[in-house]
Image (cartoon, rainbow, N blue to C red):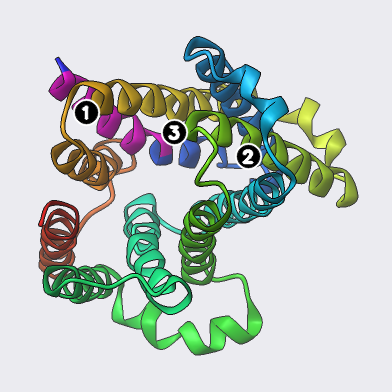
Amino acid sequence: MWIVFACLSALFAGLTAVLAKAGVASTSSTVATALRTIVVAAGAWAMAALTGVVSGVASIDGRSLLFLVLSGLATGASWLCYFAALTRGDVSRVAPIDKLSTVVAILLALIFLGEPVSPWGGAGIVVITVGTLLMVEPADLAALPGALRRGGSWLVYALASAFFAALTSILGKVGVSGVDATLGTAVRTIVVLVMAWGIVVLRGRAGEVVAIPLRELAFIVASGAATCASWLAYYHALRGGPASIVVPIDKLSVLVTVGVSALVFHERFTRRYVLGLGLLCAGTAAMVML
């Protein structure tokens, strides 16, 4: 049964980006992130309650709480950048860049934590990076230096999302090793919730909430629900199956995102893109299985 949950985790994770893209057709990415976070936070705390770890909140020490807050801020920054990237670029282009967070996290762990990288891990880093580069149009890569100076490019926001997602993992690794993962996730979502709505208020966008088209609001809520469903399925899969198989299945959710984006948004892919996607999947599988 665990293999079914692992596949469901990948399915819902892959649908998250597609649903989010549909939800930001005319809605501000900042407002969409804030609304989505309400759903995710509710789901995270429901999971914590179901697993019986809520009572552990009182026993979190000051150091762990500090790193949970920092990790939550990094998570919030990643989500904000991800939604900003989705408003500016195709979902099939944004999603693979976000997967670079795996590579960045390994490199940060090597630099700051001294964690060794196996030969297979090193090969996986190279293959994932090459595959991701192949999935980006040469014109976008050539324009990246200028976009970094000016801001506003989907690629800049997607890269920032990957960096902050990797930073989330490193901060969690450093400071919250003694905190239950489900409880830590729930606490982080509260930080993201406060951060996202704080930005909405500071930017004077709170009034936009009531003006969001119902169709887009439904997709935003569905995106948050898909994230919660993915987390829940992933948790059940890990409880019953080996991580060496569950993790790669979940990581290959990019295949769902790309496939659904082709059907829903009619996005088309070159042979270069398909080759890059194949390398991305192969590199990810190698890194987590070997």
**Residue 156, horizontal then vertical, whole percent:** 52, 72
Q: Is residue 60 left or right of residue 144?
A: right
- Residue type at the position of mark 1: Ala
Give yes or no for contact between labels 3 and 1 (Cβ–Cβ under 8 Å): no
Q: Is residue 229 left or right of residue 195?
A: left
Q: Is residue 159 left or right of residue 15?
A: right
State the extent of the magenta-drawn residues as a range: 2-16
**Distance (Cα) linking label 3 and label 1:** 20 Å
Q: Within 10 angstroms of label 3, few (less than 14), some, or many (20 or more) residues?
A: many
Above or below, 146 relative to 11: below
Give the label on residue 6, or none.
1
Marks 1 and 2: which is nearer the front?
Answer: 2
Q: Residue at x 55, y 81 (%)?
A: 147
Marks 3 and 2: which is nearer the front?
Answer: 2
**Residue 129, horizontal then vertical, whole percent:** 25, 73
SS assignment at label 3: helix
- Residue type at the position of mark 2: Arg
SS assignment at label 2: helix
Can residue 48 be seen at all in this image of the molecule?
yes
- Give the labeled residue for mark 2: 188
**Distance (Cα) linking label 1 and label 2:** 23 Å
- Residue type at the position of mark 3: Leu
Q: Main secondary structure of the magenta part?
A: helix
Q: Would residue 227 be counted in the magenta stretch?
A: no
Q: Would residue 6 be counted in the magenta stretch?
A: yes
Q: Is residue 123 left or right of residue 39?
A: left
Q: Quadrant of residue 54?
A: top right
